Image (cartoon, helix red, strand yellow):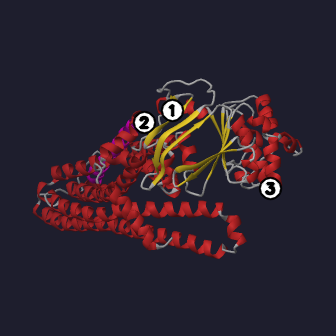
């Protein structure tokens, strides 16, 4: 990855969002709606804390002004009130910090679960058109930032607004002429926030894309580690990762510089304003229009005002970042998921008759893969699909499993158009043994039982036996409880394929698909695998995508695809 590609990627993301409805505070509130009760308590605590904080400068000014001016005041009463306000503020702030952490953790978990579940149900086409790094960054880094904004920034916004307005109102009550100076600063503050806020929002999108690139490179590098070592490309891989992290760090530093400028600049303006107020207040003291108590209270409120105003400036920048994150989140959540609810016609266990009827198909944004394919497969038949890469073999399997929908024509199982059937029910009819076994880092038992819902030990053992995996499993020290490592790295290629076959068989499908499942075997290993799979294939309709001779010998019929059409049909074994 280079810096230019990162910038181009971020610009593409921004352009894709350009036509969408602008993201606002209402969208953020909608996201937090399930937690409205606890968040409302946080808002109330923050407002209560702000109310007590506003009372402190008033009473402190009365106390200090009385002491300096020699005016009799109810000292004990004022001290008691100040102690009560300070103690109450501390208690409320503790409650805010405690509840914010607790609610934030639950909100983060809820958002992660919501996004993860939605992503699981998105069609394969979405994932194939989007980098995994983008999705992973959104599900981890971006979601956390959004959760922190909701629970640590947005909930205290009403309190900060109240403190700002309250301080200004009380300053007007003390001396209206002095307080008139305050509104002059508001347009200046707004202009600064507007100018810097635009930069922050654009940077937020670029940072998200850069973080996604880091995740994607790391994930890809770990998956490619054996090849990296074989070709001694460790240094190149490290340089690629360093370049990505340096670019992300540069963007983060740029964002940090804006934040570093934003708060001190606003604070400086507020402090300069307070200095001018002090000069004007001195004149008021000389003329007797302002009492010492009023002067100290006014100055305390001026100092107090710098804190919420600076905080509001920070909130503005964070809001721009949150809007960018929410826009990317909505881009994913707005994607239609596969409808796995039982809304289509129900299908019981199929006999296994399959018909492709004038099927046409093209992957999104690509040329046609299948053009008018018509093919009948009889129940219990073993059919081999052969052809060059890109001929359309895997596309036919993807359509049968309803990973995609055909652009034309229909696919029927037992005479029923699968487009009218429940998606989950269709997939339950098919057992898939892919070229890559797609195993996860768990036990052999976990990987086999992945193919069914809560299977019994006896069912797992039966599937392993039919897949001819029981013998090598029994030879392992922990047997079924052996942890196989990432992608089954602790097993041989043949062992992984037998586990994959057992996983497909455990749901006892009437249709079995081998998608280049024997490609990792040598000729002898392939013959042994095919011979031992006879029991697994018995009574099932089998589609074998292959070009290997031993597997072709297993087929009742061989169909050759070329350029998305069937060019040859021939009998297989006699």
Whether residue 434 is visible: yes
Figure quadrant of residue 375: top right
- Above or below for 106 versus 196: above
Which of the two residues, 381 or 517, is positioned nearer the viewer here?
Answer: 381
Q: Which residues are magenta?
A: 38-63
Residue beneath disc 2: 35
Is 157 on the left or on the right of 514, as rendered? Answer: left
Query: Which element type, helix, strand or loop, lies under badge 1?
Result: helix
Distance from disc 1 to disc 2, alpha carbons, whole Å, reads 41 Å
Residue beneath disc 1: 418
Residue beneath disc 3: 523
| Rendering coords of residue 201 (x, y %) | 34, 60
Distance from disc 3 to disc 1, alpha carbons, whole Å, reads 37 Å
Q: Which badge, 3 or 1, comes first in the chain's sequence? A: 1
Q: Residue at x 28, y 48 (%)?
A: 21
Magenta stretch: includes residue 55: yes
| Rendering coords of residue 312 (x, y %) | 31, 55
Is 200 on the left or on the right of 465, as rendered? Answer: left
Figure disc tally: 3
| Rendering coords of residue 499 (x, y %) | 75, 43
């Amino acid at each position: 990855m280079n810096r230019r590609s990162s910038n181009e990627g971020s610009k593409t993301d921004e352009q894709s969002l350009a036509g969408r409805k602008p993201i606002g505070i209402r969208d953020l509130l909608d996201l937090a709606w399930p937690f409205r009760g606890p968040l409302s308590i946080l808002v109330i605590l923050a407002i209560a804390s702000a109310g007590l904080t506003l009372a402190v400068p008033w009473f402190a000014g009365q106390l200090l002004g009385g002491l300096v001016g020699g005016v009799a005041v109810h000292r004990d009463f004022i001290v008691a009130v100040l102690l009560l306000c300070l103690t109450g503020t501390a208690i409320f702030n503790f409650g805010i910090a405690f509840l914010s952490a607790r609610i934030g953790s639950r909100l983060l978990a809820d958002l992660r679960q919501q996004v993860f579940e939605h992503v699981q149900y998105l069609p394969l086409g979405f994932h194939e058109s989007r980098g995994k790094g983008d999705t992973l960054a959104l599900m981890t880094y971006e979601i956390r930032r959004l959760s922190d904004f909701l629970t640590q920034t947005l909930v205290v916004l009403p309190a900060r607004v109240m403190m700002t307005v309250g301080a200004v109102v009380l300053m007007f009550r003390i001396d209206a002429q002095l307080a008139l100076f305050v509104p002059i600063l508001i347009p200046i503050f707004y202009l600064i926030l507007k100018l810097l806020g635009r930069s922050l929002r654009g940077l937020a999108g670029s940072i998200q894309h850069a973080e996604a690139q880091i995740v994607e490179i790391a994930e890809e590098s770990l998956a490619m580690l054996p090849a990296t070592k074989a070709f001694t490309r460790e240094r190149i891989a490290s340089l690629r990762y360093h370049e990505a992290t340096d670019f992300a760090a540069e963007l983060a530093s740029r964002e940090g510089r804006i934040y570093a400028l934003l708060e001190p600049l606003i604070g400086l303006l507020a402090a300069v304003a307070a200095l001018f107020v002090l000069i004007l207040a001195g004149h008021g003291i000389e003329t007797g229009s302002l009492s010492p108590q009023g002067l100290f209270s006014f100055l305390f409120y001026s100092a107090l005002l710098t804190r919420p105003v600076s905080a509001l400036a920070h909130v503005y920048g964070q809001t721009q970042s949150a809007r960018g994150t929410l826009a990317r989140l909505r881009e994913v959540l707005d994607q239609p998921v596969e409808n796995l609810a039982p809304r289509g016609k129900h299908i019981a266990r199929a006999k296994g008759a399959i018909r492709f009827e004038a099927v046409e198909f093209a992957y999104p944004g690509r040329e046609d893969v299948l053009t008018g394919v018509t093919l009948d497969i009889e129940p219990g038949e073993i059919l081999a699909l052969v052809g060059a890469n890109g001929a359309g073999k895997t596309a036919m399997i993807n359509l049968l499993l309803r990973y995609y929908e055909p652009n034309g024509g229909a696919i029927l199982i037992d005479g029923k158009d699968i487009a009218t059937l429940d998606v989950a029910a269709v997939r339950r009819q098919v057992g898939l043994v892919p070229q890559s076994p797609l195993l996860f880092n768990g036990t052999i038992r976990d990987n086999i039982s992945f193919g069914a819902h809560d299977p019994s030990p006896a069912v797992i053992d039966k599937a392993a036996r039919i897949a001819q995996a029981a013998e090598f499993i029994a030879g392992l020290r922990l047997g079924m409880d052996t942890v196989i490592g990432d992608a089954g790295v602790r097993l041989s290629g043949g062992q992984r394929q037998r586990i994959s076959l057992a996983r497909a068989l455990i749901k006892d499908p009437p249709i079995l698909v081998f998608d280049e499942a024997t490609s990792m075997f040598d000729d002898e290993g392939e013959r042994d695998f095919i011979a031992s799979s006879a029991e697994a294939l018995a009574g099932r309709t089998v589609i074998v995508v292959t070009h290997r001779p031993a597997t072709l010998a297993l087929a009742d019929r061989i169909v050759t695809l070329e350029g998305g059409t069937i060019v040859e049909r021939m009998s297989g074994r006699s």
